[in-house]
Amino acid sequence: MVMKTCVLIGKPNVGKTLLLLNLAKFLGNKTIKLHFINADGNSMAKVYDIEVAKHYLCNRQPFSTMGIQWARINVGRQYIELVDTTGLTNDMPEAIDLRSAMAQTIIFIKNASILLHVVDASALSSQTLPIDDIDTVLSDTFGRNDNYLMLVNKIDMMDRTDGLSNKVTQAFNVSDDKIIYVSALNKTGFNGIINRINE
Ligand SMILES: Nc1nc2c(ncn2[C@@H]2O[C@H](COP(=O)(O)OP(=O)(O)OP(=O)(O)O)[C@@H](O)[C@H]2O)c(=O)[nH]1
Ligand SMILES: [Mg+2]
C-alpha cells in the first residue's frame, strides 16, 4: 500500500501543530520523530517526547511553525505521513522568509492524499466570511475534492455547541460529511479523523 500523506493546512494559530502532536499521542505514542524541512529544502529530524514538543512548537504566537514538520505515524492498519505546514493568511506578507514558507505549504497541498483544513471554531462569527478570506478560498477551492476534510478545532472553547454546525455550514460551502468537530487540546473527535484516514 502506498503511504498516505495527510497535510494539515489553515490559518496561523488554529491548532495544526497541537493536532499533529496530540493525534500522535492519542494513537499511543509517547515520543515522536519530527522531520523539519525549511523553505530552502534543508531538512533535519529530531526525536521528541511529545509533551516537550508541545512546549517548544505550539504557541499562541502566529507563525510558530515556519516550514514543514512531519512525522510517520501508525494509524492501526497503516503508516501515514502527517504533515504540518506554515499557516496561510489572507494577504501575502512582505517578509520573504514567510512568503517562501507559505509557498512550501501550497506545494504540499498539491501532494496531499488527504487535505486536513483546520479552522478555529472560536473565531467563527454567525456572518458569512468575506469571499477573499483564506478559509473561504481554501474551502471553495478544495472543499469538493474527495481528499478534503475540514477540522473545526477548539470546540472546547465554545460555551454552546448547538449552533456551531449552522455557523460552519453558513460560513463554508462544504458538505456535512466532510466536517469533523475536534479539540486538539482535549483530543476529542480524533476517532472521526482516524476513520477517514483508514477509509
Ligand atoms: N482551547 C484550545 N486551544 C487550542 C486548541 N488547539 C490549539 N490550541 C491553542 O492554540 C494555540 C495555537 O496552537 P498551534 O498548534 O501552535 O497552532 P498552529 O496552527 O500550529 O499555529 P502556527 O504554527 O502559528 O500556524 C496554542 O496556544 C494552542 O495551545 C484547542 O483545541 N483548544
Ligand atoms: Mg504550528
Image (cartoon, rainbow, N blue to C red):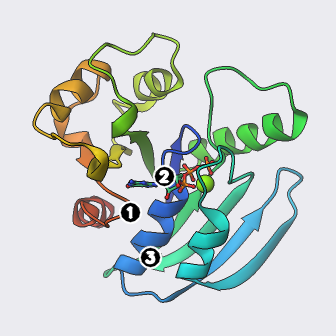
In the displayed structure, does residue 91 sit left or right of residue 121?
right
- Sooner in the amino-acid sequence: mark 3 or mark 2: 2
CB within 8 Å, label 3 to label 1: no
- Sooner in the amino-acid sequence: mark 2 or mark 1: 2
Query: Pointer 3: residues within 10 angstroms few (<14), some, or many (20+)?
Result: many
Q: Amino acid at mark 3?
A: Ala
Q: Give the distance between the C-alpha atoms of the residues marked 2 and 1, in whole angstroms.
A: 9 Å
Which residue is labeled 1 in the image? 185
In the rendered structure, find residue 85 and report the number of the disc placed on it: none
Q: Amino acid at mark 1?
A: Leu
Q: Is residue 152 above or below residue 30?
A: above
* Res 101 → quadrant: top right
In the displayed structure, does residue 7 sit left or right of residue 104?
left
Q: Give the distance between the C-alpha atoms of the residues marked 3 and 2, in whole angstroms.
A: 14 Å
The mark lying in front, picked from 3 and 2, is 2
Q: Quadrant of the N terminus?
A: bottom left
157 or 88, nearer to the observer: 157
Q: Residue at x 50, y 70 (%)?
A: 21
Q: Position of residue 153 (x, y in %)?
A: 35, 48
In the rendered structure, find residue 15 and report the number of the disc placed on it: 2
CB within 8 Å, label 3 to label 2: no
User: Is the residue indicated by label 2 positioned so its CB lies within 8 Å of ligand 1?
Assistant: yes
Query: Residue 21, can we see it?
Result: yes
Which residue is labeled 3 in the image? 24
CB within 8 Å, label 2 to label 1: yes
User: Is the residue indicated by label 1 positioned so its CB lies within 8 Å of ligand 1?
Assistant: yes
Q: Quadrant of the C terminus?
A: bottom left
